[in-house]
Amino acid sequence: MTLLVGKHTRAIVQGITGNQGAFHTRLMLDYGTQIVGGVTPGKGATVSQGVPVFDTVASALEKIDANASIIFVPAPFAKEAGMEAIDAGLNPVVIITEMIPARDSMVLMAYAKEHATTIVGPNTPGVITPGEAKLGIMPGDVFTSGGVGVASRSGTLTYEIASYLTHAGIGQSTCLGIGGDPITGLNFVDVLKMFRDDKSTDAVVLIGEIGGSAEEDAANYIAETHYPKPVAAYVAGRAAPPGKRMGHAGAIITGTEGTADAKMKRFSEVGVLVAEVPSELPRLLQQQKAALVQH
Amino acid sequence: MKLFEYESKSLAQNLGINTPRGGLASTPDEARDIHKRIGGEVVIKAQVLVAGRGKAGGIKFGSKPEETRDRASEILSMTIKGEKVKKVLIEQKLNIKKELFGSIVLDRANKCQTVLASDQGGIDIEDVAKQNPEKILHHRLDPVFGMRGYDARQVGLKLGYTGQRLNSLTDLLSNLYRLSVIYDAELVESNPLVETNDGKFVTADLRVIVDDNSLFRHPEFQERAKEASGEVTPLEAKARENGLAFVELDGDIGIMGNGAGLVMATLDMVNHYGGKPANFCDVGGGANAEHVATALQIIQGDQKVSRIFINILAGITRCDEVAKGIVDVKKVVGLKKPLVVRMQGTNFEEGKRILNSIGITTLEKMDEAARLVVAMKVA
């Protein structure tokens, strides 16, 4: 899927001179992503990883042609960094930064909506179209090009599942993390819509976790729209106790809401193939494919 | 971060929100003295962070100061859902005309704050929410402009108020919203929110949860955030002081991994194969040897842990750093419990070599490793 990133992507890295920013700019370049500039206030007119650095996004765009942004700036500055990218017309904007205050994310998402900008994250591993480009921090070598779209609320678990798929010979069209925070730009329903319209995607894997209602909303959407492509899912956190935050800010069960069991049950009810453990996903997809061929 | 009721109310008082007259006591005698000072009948409330204290017997009444002392003594010796009661709040008993429920929550799905309110407040609000969801009104607030006067008035009207009472309730709701903004609260909830016989609205109970991610801009909570509150066990407190995302569970297999989702999936997999995890421990992305060593020492220091499963899928994290952390623990304090290590990803060959050199074999597949650690015979 080249809707979000692909060969056409020309990205700016906001926060390019920080540890993470510099390190991942190098890896994104190595993967073949076009990173055309970076922004760090006060470091304008320098060069990082062979890429020109500017003080603001607007001044960068006077010199270079870019159409996307990836943000690594620290949490206290992330809201404004996002707005700066939106104001400059960059789209999508991928926000890797974690631990952004919920109020900041809420305001930023409202701003993005007003400007029709797609935000991936915050607290996301980013987005990768295997073989084309990645805007993110995921290890490129576990992914391979193919027809399964993957959307996840977690980082390392996405790599784990992508590597199972890859080893089983199942390639991916696009993999993206919607983000582990309570408020994110894209949710599962938005991504399901993208995958539905994407010709290179023929099946979808959703990797959910406890907390919130993103999985239930996705299940309802699948049922209501008679979603045309097979969907398989895994939901992490069956072993999680209520009221405890499991690493991600968004991963908390409140009362009986948000449990993994409830989410898995809802997925099953609407015909989603539900894996008990992540390693079952390739088999579920293969069975589904075999069943489709027989019909 | 959850605030205690008395902390929440102290923030509210500064914003002019009505709370019952009262005081905080750590001993039965203090409770008696507060009762003497405020007079009348009082309510004695356990100060705990867990919900459901009313049903657990953590709220009692006192008509005389001596009675209040005795009831306070009972409550102060209670442990409610694992949380020891250290303080009680003594408050005047209100003349209740009606108990309402009013809450301003962070609404994840709608990416805004939403007011939840009901004219059927009290301890059974969860039942109301389940059985008569239409009795709870939802009013979304604009994410940028927030609660405007007319938002609050609309909520008050829907709850059935007009005239002076509508204006009073509107003021109170506006102030609760203001509290949520000033303190970056993901939840401000009053249940019951009491309408008194003389026409006032008083937050008889108040719960505030501050967004942990906003603590950097709230110096007023810095000290409070460090305290090991009732929410965390001593082991969790120790782990968190060391920068680990850690949740204690009741099984015997210690778990360490990198990335919240992967660690959650690890717990699930151990459960799936019939084992019981002792903890959730996420060392995070890019953990260095020292960080891994700290985590391992905390896990192996836990008495109930019989064996440990380390699950690393390295992206930003490097397997050789993880391996060095394990070696350091072996050198400094020794490895006290059997280990199963699964490693894959960045620098995994080097990590494997380092661990092999101290006699630890590594596995590449998560399933295989989970099965092995579950099946492992322990003394």
Image: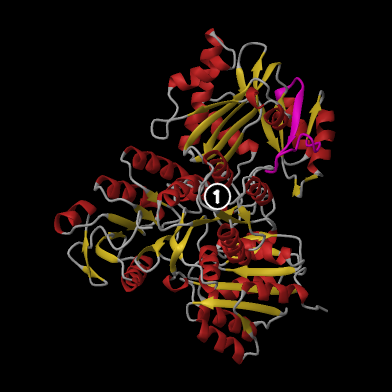
- The answer to whether B192 appears left or right of B375 in the picture is left
- For the record, the magenta segment spans B38-58
Q: Is residue A244 above or below residue B147?
A: below
Residue A48 image position (x, y, % from top left): 25, 70
Identity of the residue furthest to the front in this view: A295
- The answer to whether B202 appears left or right of A196 in the picture is right
Residue B116 image position (x, y, % from top left): 57, 28
Q: Nearer the viewer, residue A86 or B365?
A: B365
Q: Residue at x 52, y 38 (%)?
A: B106
Asked where in the image residue B300 lies, by quadrant, the reply is bottom right
Asked where in the image residue B293 lies, by quadrant, the reply is bottom right
Q: What colouring method underlies this structural image?
A: secondary structure
Q: Residue at x 34, y 66 (%)?
A: A132
- The answer to whether A131 appears left or right of B226 in the picture is left
Letter of the chain that mark 1 sits on in the rendering: A
Mark 1 is on which residue type? Gly
Q: What secondary structure do most residues of the magenta stretch adopt?
A: loop
Residue B193 included in the magenta stretch of the image: no
Q: Secondary structure at mark 1?
A: loop
Q: Nearer the viewer, residue B359 or B203?
A: B359
Q: Is residue B239 visible?
A: no
**Residue at the spot of label 1:** A250
